[in-house]
Every structure is written in C-alpha cells, then in structure tokens.
Image (cartoon, grey):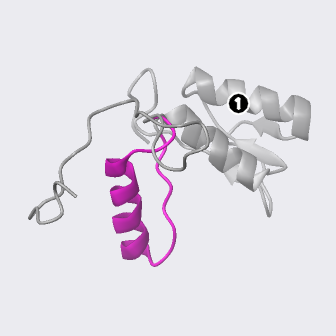
C-alpha cells in the first residue's frame, strides 16, 4: 500500500469509506477504522488478549454492562447516559441499580466514574 514502509503508520481521519454493501472492510468510522484497528491490536498484544475500542464512552458502558449482565450495579451519581443504560437493563434484564453504600455480592458490579460527570468530583 501507499504507507507500507512508513516508520509510523498514518492516522486515518476519514469517517466514511467507499464500499460495496457486500464488501468486507471499513465502511464507517463509528464501527471501525484503520487507526482503531491498529490501536486495538497494540493494546491487545500488551494485555495478552483482545482489546475493543468504542467510539463513545456510552457505547463502551453499554457493552460492558450488557456483557456482564450483573444482578446489581452499585453506583452514585455520574453520567446520565449510564443511568439510562441501567434503567434499560432493569426493565429488560432485571439488573438493579443500587447506591454505592448498599451490599453487593458475587457477580455484582461497582461502577465508579472518576472524575464524575458532570461535576468532575474525584473518588
């Protein structure tokens, strides 16, 4: 390719790609992009596993909580989008949002946002 001998790979700044609907590869940057693919590979190698990067914190929040599907999530304050995800999970998956001071058990999640949005409080 054009950059195959680059010392440092270029950062892809495009958001859309020309693609046939049946073609595999990059279509839209919110799904995946060359820079994100490269970063996932680097982090995955460092962690000796697989890394997945998301285009927003809310997408990452939803993915983690949906994957874990905990009985309870202990949380205090924080981003309203996180609370919207928890309300959706409570309605559909019976996940309960509880205060950080409540008892938690095996399989529960303690969710701490720091600095906390929107107040920038630090735990």
Q: Position of residue 107 (x, y in %)?
A: 78, 60
Residue stretch rendered in magenta on the structure: 30-54
Q: Alpha-carbon neighbours of circle 1 within 10 Å: few (<14), some, or many (≥20)?
A: some
Q: Nearer the viewer, residue 19 or 81?
A: 19
**Measured along the vertical axis of the image, is residue 89 above or below residue 102?**
above
Q: Nearer the viewer, residue 61 or 114?
A: 61
Q: Nearer the viewer, residue 1 or 42?
A: 1
In the image, what residue occupies the spot 38% across and 27% down?
Answer: 120
**Quadrant location of residue 1?**
bottom left
Q: Which residue is tagged 1? A: 85
Q: Nearer the viewer, residue 102 or 71?
A: 71
In the image, what residue occupies the spot 45% across and 31% down?
Answer: 116
In magenta stretch: residue 122? no
- In screen coordinates, is 54 left or right of 42? right
In the image, what residue occupies the spot 74% across and 46% down?
Answer: 66
The total number of labels drawn is 1
Is residue 102 at least partly visible in the picture? Answer: no
């Amino acid at each position: 390719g054009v950059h195959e001998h680059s010392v440092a790979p270029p950062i892809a700044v495009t958001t859309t790609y020309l693609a046939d609907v049946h073609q595999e590869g990059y279509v839209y940057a919110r799904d995946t992009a060359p820079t994100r693919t490269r970063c996932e590979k680097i982090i995955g190698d460092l962690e000796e596993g697989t890394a997945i990067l998301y285009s927003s914190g809310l997408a990452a929040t939803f993915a983690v909580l949906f994957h874990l599907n905990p009985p309870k999530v202990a949380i205090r304050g924080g981003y309203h989008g996180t609370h919207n995800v928890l309300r959706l999970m409570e309605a559909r998956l019976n996940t309960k949002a509880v205060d950080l001071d409540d008892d938690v058990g095996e399989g529960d999640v303690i969710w701490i946002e720091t600095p906390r949005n929107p107040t920038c409080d630090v735990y």
